[in-house]
Amino acid sequence: MSKLDFKELGLRVGLEIHVQLDTSRKLFCKCPTKLVEEQSKFNIERGLRPAKSETGEIDPAAMLEWRRERVFIYEAPPESSCLVEIDEEPPHQLDEDSLTVAIAIAKALNMRVVDEVHVMRKIVVDGSNVSGFQRTALIALDGFIMEGEKKIGIQTLCLEEDAARKISEEGNKVFYRVDRLGIPLVEIATAPDINDPEEAMRVALKLGQLVRLTGYAKRGLGTIRQDLNVSIRDGAKVEIKGVQHLYLIPRVVELEALRQQRLLEIRDELLKRNVKPEDIREEIVDVTEVFENTSSKIIRRSIATPGNGVFAVVLKKFKGLLGKEVQPGRRFGTELADYARVWGGVGGIFHTDELPSYGITAEEVRNLYEKLGANPSEDAIVIVADQREKCVKALKAVVDRARQAVIGVPEETRSANPDGTSKYMRPRPGAARMYPETDIPLAYVTPDLVEKAMKIVPEPPDAKLKRFVEEHKLSVELATTLIRDLRLDLFEKLTAKYGGSVQPSIIASILVNIIPSLRKENVPIENVTDELIEEIVDMLSRGEISKEAIPDLMKHALLNPGKKLKELVKELGITRLDVNELDRIIEEVVERHREKLLARKEKAFAIAMSETMKIVRGRIDGAIVAENVKKKLREKLNIGSDDEYSRQ
């Protein structure tokens, strides 16, 4: 993939950062904010439907979810839920601690805090909220954050309840657990002022870091989520949800810019071919007879089920375009397939740009064109094999998406894939999904509340940098890198706890040097937890391991997530040596290499040090080894002085 010129493309990116707050209770009840892994015996079953807004409209995203006709089963563990979560009791007053944290974050972002907090209902009928809506409250507006010399606007800061956890799906049934439902969540939305993929990652890092520095952010996988709004010139605003890892943000942004560029190229080609949206007709034809004796296992397996068949639609003058790559490994045909899956519930589609293949023969393709009266030199055909009703829904969605291709890039919500590509989820929600929450009274932002919030406003980066250099004796370079690390608050916590026994520079190096170096070795650093880092620092403070052992120990801990650190220390042979054992090893090394050391006195220290480190590496600090090697060479062989060693 050639390097994109983002300035030329007119790239614009806005971020929505969601961070769970670590408060004692949920946002609208007194249940604790903890997750429960045991399956609950108390379950309820619900079906959800969208409601019209005050304008009389139904949100298109909500309509899609309703058309899926799914049933939702909710587990309600009593340790972390009550009648509020299962929508059998009105929500309680907004949690004041959560509101205080939100105000503190808003102040750090230079925002204008509202005087009165009004809770709104946002329609969500995908099952993630038992009531069919999510409660959200606007806390502050119109702020900014500095990225270098550039000001990035912060449009809104909201306080909202997190959704239920999806556990599994079986047919049309979706299983959720409501322990997460109601955990306080801050949502920070930036203006579309970001113009570069790397800049997007840096801004996301700063925002997530700022929330954590209040001391009230939850930690761990899933506690912070990033959604991206991406567009290019002449493209469209596309929301990409569920970017779990910061380092994936640049890739997601770049590949969405590429996708929109390729879709605009497809639009331009369709316009050259004089294709109009109305030329793409919704004429769905049963073509099962064409495939009665097919060798395609997929089609044969499908039509063997009573009521199933093969259905097709012609896309006039689309030949060659369905095979055009829009993202690595994803073609325009993949975009059509996404729509077919979401709207029709089918497994996928076939199209003639990729045929003959998959057991479908050239003769079957010719018969297909003949039956549909299509032109093999300029038309494309899409086929689906499944139940008739599902096939019709799927192909109608394909036609709709093909019509949009003539116009350009459709506004839509997509989900991020692990490789940075994305797939269609649903239409972008509109304004018709919000209406006032009538069960919760207003919350007033009083001077006392603001004063309380000001006590947890994070320290400014410049002041923190100065303090790290002066108090913790970090180099300016290490301190600067640490200031940009998402685990900055963890550094402060560990330094406060272990600073008397572990040098702050070692703790900082674990975060900003060792973990990134493991990523380069393809070690799954996404498995790094705060608990793992603290356990390693704790072992270091107790003298159970040396600082040199940390990279190997962390690497093997991430590659063997089920094993305890103490087991790995024994397996790797990196139990910390005491000085007496080190003295014995050095003495053996000196005796074994006596002749060589005496013959090459000018290199004696380097030789002895090298041979000793082969045995003790990772088990004791190198500085201690060096000091004891010098001492032993003087005692046993009368070799070396400090001046001589300094010249070696």
Image (cartoon, rainbow, N blue to C red):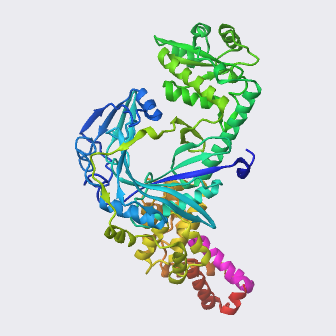
Percent position (x, y) of residue 460? 50, 73
Which SS type dominates the magenta stretch? helix
Percent position (x, y) of residue 459? 47, 73
Give whichever of 327, 89 is nearer the camera: 89
Is residue 346 rendered magenta in the image? no
Horizontally, residue 66 falls left or right of residue 250, namely left
Is residue 601 rendered magenta in the image? yes
Residue 145 placement: quadrant = bottom right
Percent position (x, y) of residue 259? 66, 40
Above or below for 411 versus 145? above
What are the residue bounds of the magenta stretch? Answer: 595-619
Horizontally, residue 647 falls left or right of residue 29, namely right
Give whichever of 419, 277 is nearer the camera: 277
Percent position (x, y) of residue 3? 74, 49
Residue 448 placement: quadrant = bottom left
Work out whether residue 619 can be spotted. no
Residue 398 placement: quadrant = top right
Horizontally, residue 509 falls left or right of residue 601, namely left
Query: Where does the N terminus fall, quadrant-wise?
Result: top right
Query: Where does the C terminus fall, quadrant-wise?
Result: bottom right
Give whichever of 180, 434 is nearer the camera: 434
Point out the residue furthest to the front here: 55
Above or below for 535 versus 639? above
Above or below for 174 versus 389? below
How many marks can you see? Answer: 0
Work out whether residue 140 can be spotted. yes
Q: Residue at x 60, y 46 (%)?
A: 230
Above or below for 38 versus 114? above
Give whichever of 478, 138 is nearer the camera: 138
